[in-house]
Amino acid sequence: ALTTVSILDWNKVEDVFGHGMLVFDNLALAFGAVLAFVLLVWFVLFEESLRTTDRKIDLHTLVLFSFTGAIILASYQNLVMLFLGVEILSIPLYVLAASRRGDLLSNEAGFKYFFLGAFASALLLFGIALVFGSTGSFELSAIGAAVDGVSSPSMLAAGMVLMLAGFAFKTGLAPFHFWTPDVYQGSPTPFTALMATVVKGAAFIAMFRFFGTLSNGGSYTDVMAFLAAATLIVSNTSALLQSDTKRLLAYSSISHAGFMLGAMMFCTTAEPSTLLYYVLVYSISSLASFAVLDYVSRYQEGTLDIGSMKGLARRNPVMAGTMTLALLSMSGIPPLSGFMAKYLVITNVISGGATWLAIIMILTSAVAVYYYLRIIILMFTPIENAGRMVISGTQNWTLLLLNVAMIGLFFAAGILF
């Protein structure tokens, strides 16, 4: 993925399929490579958890179907394919969220995700219908050329707002984030990690491709800035009150959605490399943290409160070290890649004229350091009669490689940008 980013010519079109409905240009290939890498790491980290279920093949199939939707979202050129991609991505996740049938929280997560996800899809579809009604086309190129001369600009504006609301729900942006903590907490941890990485990244890619094609996409910058600011403030203040580690990481994911939105606010003029880098860096840190959480829960009878992390440094130093680096990276501490990702976003926001949003990003990142440090301090707090936590050699080496990636991507940014 890093090599692809460094050599891409973002305007070069490679392959066109389905009469132009899917275009595998460099943007689609780069994001597809990143999402494929993240999914591969996901399979390695959570293979043991999936192996313990009697529906392993079914779950793997649903994950691959969802990934197919993610690839469609990275490459669509027609709003019909956008809607199909969203549904192909989402429908398997409704099942995966409720896949732990004997767990009431998992059933609740699947129920909430299905109904609220269907509502968001309805908003997106209604927005697509209004955009088609005002421009006369589903093709992104035709819509981009027609937006300046439409006969009913109010219909177009309403369609754009509804589509933005649909995207905001899928990405977990405030005030459409209310489903995220409950669904992330109730879903089995492997699928929570999948939703926080591949699904969130694919939704932002789709959002970037849509608004980046429009000649008037910049007119929605102020709305996006408001959504980003609200997301950062609400998520980080709410995270301070959490005692469940998984729920805390859910609010952390919402916070990073605010940064990702900041990375694509100026999509009509900016290259997608900053968003691509942020998705990759955040996904690595998020996968590492959820993997450690999943391993710890096996020894805590499913308990995921913050106290369950106490003494982890003594019980398994590799897991504690990985969790520490992941949390520090997500909080933006150098020399970890999360710092460079946030730095690039804040720089782009300032250069775009939204200095006030950059200040909010910096202040909320400082707040995030506090609740991340709560977990880190507990992990290094001595505990008596602590038994060892053992994971497989493959998982152990994968965690070590993720640690290297979190540091290496910090220095790689100097080459890529």
Image: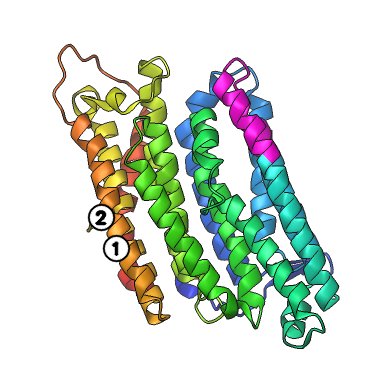
What amino acid is at disc 2?
A: Ala
How far apart, in angstroms, are the residues tagged by discs 1 and 2?
A: 6 Å
**In the image, residue 194 above or below residue 71:** above
Task: Please identify the quadrant where the C terminus is shown.
Answer: bottom left
Whether label 1 touches label 2, CB < 8 Å: yes
Location of residue 371 (image quadrant): top left
Image position, residue 197 (x, y; %)? 50, 47
Magenta-drawn segment: 92-115
Q: Residues within 10 Å of mark 1 (few under 14, many from 20)?
A: some
Residue 281 in view in this figure: no
Q: Which residue is mark 2?
A: 366
Residue visible at 70% across and 73% down? 157
Q: Which residue is mark 1?
A: 362
Image coloring type: rainbow
| Circle 2 SS class | helix
Pick whichever, 170 or 208, lies toward us.
170
Pick whichever, 74 or 24, lies toward us.
74
In magenta stretch: residue 177: no
